[in-house]
Image: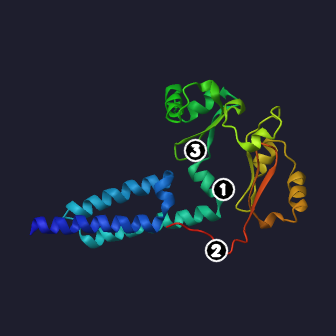
Amino acid sequence: MDHLAILIRSFSAFVILMLIGRILGKQTLSNMNFHEFVTAVILGAIAANFAFNEKIEVVHLLIALSVFTITSYVLSKFFLKFRNFKMWTEGAPTVLIEGGFILEDNLKKNNMTLDSLNQQLRQKEIFNIEEVEYALLEINGKLSVQKKKELQAVTLKDLQLNAGNATQFPIELVIDGQLLHGNLNSNHIPESWLLSQLKARDKKLEDVFYAVKGSNGQLYVDEYKDKIQHPIDVE
């Protein structure tokens, strides 16, 4: 009977974790941030006790699982609405290489050695750090890299452009309808320039979900209303 009880509890714990993962969504699996990491560790510990620790009542374990699941779910929704709170709790991506130069202070702030940086670059098939123009450490610990212009893959569009045009790093100006004043000020982009660009496209700031000044200097804008009749959602 003891073996049967453990079998049932283990299977139940597995099913419950599967349901919790489904509730919390795909973001938890692909890009685990700080609060999702903490939640995953705690839920795993509770599920293990649920499966093997018969001294703890099932009701208490179910209550604990429910509390942490609901907390994580509410935080995820809260982060969607209040970006500043999300940035305060999770931090922001850190630039480790800018313009081909390694930012040693940023490496130290993230407790990252040059060996670790080179290891992550090699995982992206970059064995020569001189090939890198920009490298960012994302909040999930992964490294995003942009190679220097002369080393990037050539597209048909590139063949039509002047090879002498300077490349700059894309600058986010609007996220979730909120104007990023810090990015505007640090990159010397007047707010009037953004508003005039939107006006030329017959758009208002409150209509914009996301806006970024691309590496070619052009403004990319995504509206809240995309006017897509049947959006695709692959389950």
**Residue 42 lies in quadrant:** bottom left
Judging from the image, what secondary structure is the residue with disc 2 in?
A: loop
Q: Which residue is mark 2?
A: 230
Q: Viewer-nearest of labels 1 and 2?
A: 2
Is residue 68 something that shows in the picture?
no
**Residue 1 lies in quadrant:** bottom left
Q: Is residue 201 left or right of residue 114?
A: right
Q: Is residue 57 left or right of residue 37?
A: left
For disc 2, the neighbor class at 10 Å (few under 14, some 14 to 19, many from 20) is few
Residue 84 shows which numbered tag? 1
Image x and y of residue 144, in percent: 59, 41
Q: Which residue is mark 3?
A: 138
For residue 55, above or below residue 111 = below
Amino acid on which the number 3 mark rests in the picture: Glu
Amino acid on which the number 1 mark rests in the picture: Asn
Judging from the image, what secondary structure is the residue with disc 3 in?
A: loop
The reply to whether discs 1 and 2 touch (Cβ–Cβ < 8 Å) is no
Judging from the image, what secondary structure is the residue with disc 1 in?
A: helix
For residue 123, above or below residue 176 = above
Q: If you read the primary sequence from the N terminus, does the residue marked by circle 1 or circle 2 appear first?
A: 1
Residue visible at 86% across and 60% down? 198
Is residue 145 something that shows in the picture?
yes
Image x and y of residue 177, in percent: 74, 62
In terms of depth relative to the viewer, which is nearer, 46 or 93? 93
For disc 3, the neighbor class at 10 Å (few under 14, some 14 to 19, many from 20) is some
Residue visible at 65% across and 62% down? 82
Residue visible at 79% across and 43% down? 216
Image x and y of residue 111, in percent: 52, 33
Q: Residue furthest left?
A: 1
